[in-house]
Amino acid sequence: MKNAVSNTMALWFFLVFSLHCAVTRCHALSDNILVVGATGTTGLRAIQGLLDVGYKPHQLFILTRNASRTHMKQLKKLGFCLIQADLQRPSSLVAMHQDVTSIVYNSAAAAKDHGVKRIQQKHDVESILMHHSKYPRHVTCLRANLFMEELWKRYTRPQILKGEYPLPVNRWRKLYLTSVRDMGRLAGTVVARESAFKQDARSKSTRIVNVAGDLLSGPQIARAFGKAQGFPCRHVNNRELTKFAKENFPELYEQIHFIQTSPEKTNIRTLKKEFPGLITSFKEFLDETKWGNVDLEFDDLSKPESLDVPDNM
């Protein structure tokens, strides 16, 4: 039970507290983007999304606290530009703050009065970026739902491959699912559009966009897993986890209660019209990531060499 609690906590911690922030420093697709908070394994999926919409490795400046890590060296060999800085030391970011014209920030989808501290932290950052005069005039907050990539992690995939998808929600409760790769695609597209429309640099333009590629119930998610892996999978409503979290882990219970009751909506149809070809359904995600290959692990999905880098770098 303790391991299950820890694993679920890790899943939802990423959902509400991850950072994939793309910042443009120029005014055209041919110029550069600063990528903050995408040096981890899941973050590489956002970088792939930026590549998908036309950016080249030499245009992507990746902020990292430690450029000597093996992971970072591999990215450098692929042509990405590394910038060593620390978000906890503002002085290391001063030079980058100059000439920044717009920000695309990865936040979390939630209605008002959601009651989740970690989501509120994300929304507080939104407020600062959108309303503080010292930040760029063009700010878009992409609010993600449950990341599909999390289902590849070691605390979810092995049990699903055994035929059970444990999720503490009723069978009719539907969840919005978001691909991290799509977050990168939309970030790059938003930046390019802002440049193309040549928005008035004197006016502040802000926008919040909920992002999801699918809306499925627990049993529907389990059936999708079953089709992708070639053998059945069933949804299990882990009520004991909900009870245990309520009694012992208040923050985890906040997250569970949120997914069980949140009224927040994402208009997937409208999103697909605005960003045609850039929104991934859950079935498409499972096919793209080769879920049915039982020999693959999350690291195979998220290592630098797995990136589809254009030949004409």
Image (tube, grey):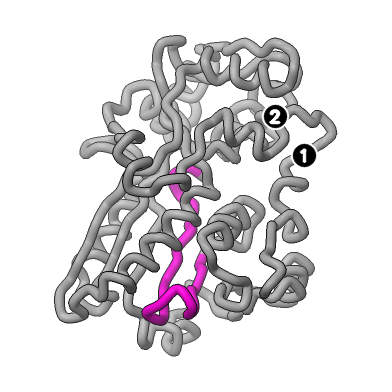
Q: Is residue 71 above or below residue 16?
A: below
- Kindly indicate whether the residue at mark 2 contacts the one at mark 1 (C-beta within 8 angstroms): yes
Residue at the image position 77 percent from the left and 46 percent from the top? 300
Residue 289's x, y, as percent? 68, 39
Q: Quadrant of the C terminus?
A: bottom right
Q: Residues within 10 Å of mark 2 (few under 14, many from 20)?
A: many
Q: Is residue 40 above or below residue 68?
A: above
Residue at the image position 75 percent from the left and 47 percent from the top? 299
Q: Which is more N-terminal, label 2 or label 1?
A: 2
The range drawn in magenta is 15-36
Q: CA distance from mark 1 to mark 2?
A: 8 Å
Residue 245's x, y, as percent? 49, 24
* Residue that badge 1 annotates: 297
Q: Quadrant of the N terminus?
A: top right
The part of the image, by quadrant, that contains residue 206 is bottom left
Task: Name the side, left or right, on which 234 lies relative to 76.
Answer: left
Provide the secondary structure element on which disc 1 rests. loop
Q: Is residue 55 above or below residue 142?
A: below
Residue 58 is covered by the magenta coloring: no
Along the line of sight, the residue nearer the viewer: 75 or 271: 271
* Residue that badge 2 annotates: 157
Q: Residue furthest right?
A: 295
The part of the image, by quadrant, that contains residue 81 is bottom right
- Hey, what amino acid is under mark 2? Arg
